[in-house]
Amino acid sequence: MVSWTILSTIVALALGIRAAPVESSTESLKQLTQADFSDATAKGLWLIEFFSPYCVHCKRFKSTWQQLTLDKASKASFGFQMAQVDCIAQGDLCNEQNVTFYPKITMYQDGQAMETYNGDRSLEDVSEYIDEHVRVFTRREISPGATSPIVPNALGHVVQLTDTTFGAAVAEGPLFVKMFAPWCGHCKKLAPVWTELASRMKGVVNIGEVNCDEHSTLCKKEGVSGYPTLTLYQSGNKLDYHGARTLVALEPWITKAVAASSGLPMLDTSELEQVVKTEPAFFVYLRTFTSPESDLDMVTRASHAHLGGIQIYQGTDPDLFDQFGADPASGSVIVSVKDHQVDSPSILHLSADMSVRSIERWLNRHRFPSAFELTAGNFPDVMRSSAADLVVLTVVGRSDSASTETILGEASRVWNRRAHGPSVLFVWMDFEQWEDWLRTMYGVKSTPSVVLADHKHLLYYDVDETEKAIALDARKIVSALDAMSSRSLVPKHSENWIERKIRVVHNGLEVFGEALAHHLYLTLFAIIGTLAAVFFFFQRIVAADTRDLSHRSRMGARLD
């Protein structure tokens, strides 16, 4: 039986005088042969045109195909390629691929023919067909790793941990632990909340507790410096919880933290609008078909520092690259989205020489919205942030929070566009809720008040260059920051004189204690050496005075 391809070839040759072949393909049109077809299409998404140089329909479609190869060249970053097969020159290959008409346009995925395109061969229709298949191809979920057969917290109870059982519990993970002392008032108040949390976290995370009076060595080893200390242990990572110790705050935090530690959730364009609407700040790690797995590993490891905090997604949707203005040809990027806007996001381009630590620093620097509320939950992260030198703290009533965020957001954007000056966070606090603390710390007695706070050094500024209170105005806040940066403002202390002296002594003792713990013999040698030097110095003085007195006694009484 003569195949369709052979028969069509004979007919075409017989009519060669009347039907001139299609002009030779340009170099931009990739051609596949029997020798390289299988290897080329083995990985990724391929749109193949099987054609005959004598086919009238192929001639008409040629310009469309050429334009498509130009328009879709950027899709190579997402694993998409286009190629042709000349069935006159590659008859056996076309027979193997069941080509029975020209042009036959077939989509291949990882070496397998998925479907044949039967729609209109217009530029718009084929272009839309390609875009949809690329979107579907890039949205494929990452194959989940082997899951542990052990169900965490199967009974929904709090586990009592000891020196001997703690290590095994951490290894089994995930584990959320309360380090407490029986006499601690805050610990007693937390006890019923902790029991209820264990019940609600059944099947999600193990909930445990350690009595530090009975297991002081363990608590010291884990760096417990106050009670209660709440810590999540997961996949070799350790994360302390600093938020409110209420069920309303604890439950979503631990749920989010455990989910994030199992991998970065996927995000595509259809979900983006809702995420932007609900989350004031988040990150998206965008990767392409050619992105190395090491990039994903680094971003995942860097994200562990923010478990339970800001959300970090991953995306492969080409439309996300377009949405954020990122070039897929440049490789993997991390996008910082904040203030419920996707315009002009901050973008970090990943490179081979980048480390997990450098990614962590970038995430930390961009984790907060332009303006937000300072609460008990985020206070440690904000006021002791390594990514911020200063905090613009605005004190208002809650009814004025929306307008205040608008003003602070404007000031933040103006300040952060500058290439110089300290890094600054812009926050507001509810005066009614924090009145006592604000009065004690910064002398705030009314609203609105604006304070430039250097909490790490317990310094602050509350007046501008004219010695007037800093006004709640974006331009004047930026002006005060400029004056502070140029050292035109004199800082005030959040502590009184006695408190400052006590802190200096305390810090000195801490340094001495740390030196003694890590360099015992060197520290003792330095102490002995210092004492010996002081003793020798005073001995010389005493000896000199003794010689002088002896000399005077020999000279006798004065005559004048």
Image (cartoon, rainbow, N blue to C red):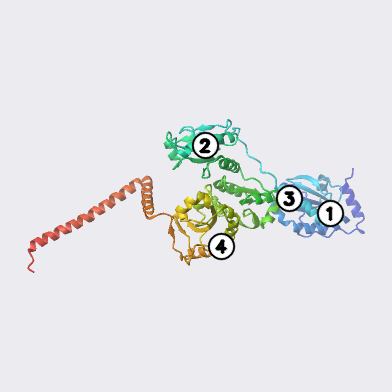
**What residue appears at the point 83 percent right and 60 percent down from the top-left corner?**
23
Q: Tags 3 and 4 in contact by the CB under 8 Å rule?
A: no
Mark on residue 170? 2
Q: Tags 1 and 2 in contact by the CB under 8 Å rule?
A: no
- Cα separation, mark 4 vs mark 1, equals 59 Å
Q: In which quadrant of the rendered image does the C terminus lie?
A: bottom left
- Cα separation, mark 1 vs mark 2, equals 60 Å
Mark on residue 473? 4
**What residue appears at the point 33 percent right and 46 percent down from the top-left corner?**
521
For disc 1, the marked residue is 121
* Label 4: few (<14), some (14–19) or many (≥20) C-alpha neighbours in 10 Å: some
> In the displayed image of the protein, which residue is found farthest to the bottom?
560
Q: In which quadrant of the rendered image does the N terminus lie?
A: top right
- Cα separation, mark 3 vs mark 2, equals 42 Å
Tell which circle, 3 or 1, labels the residue nearer the N-terminal end: 1
Amino acid type of the residue that numbered disc 4 sits on in the rendered structure: Asp
Tell which circle, 3 or 2, labels the residue nearer the N-terminal end: 3
Mark 4 or 1, closer to the camera: 4
SS for callout 3: helix
Amino acid type of the residue that numbered disc 3 sits on in the rendered structure: Val
- Cα separation, mark 3 vs mark 4, equals 48 Å
Q: Tags 4 and 2 in contact by the CB under 8 Å rule?
A: no
Residue 421 location (% of width, % of height): 51, 62
Amino acid type of the residue that numbered disc 2 sits on in the rendered structure: Val
For disc 3, the marked residue is 134
**Quarter location, residue 491:** bottom left
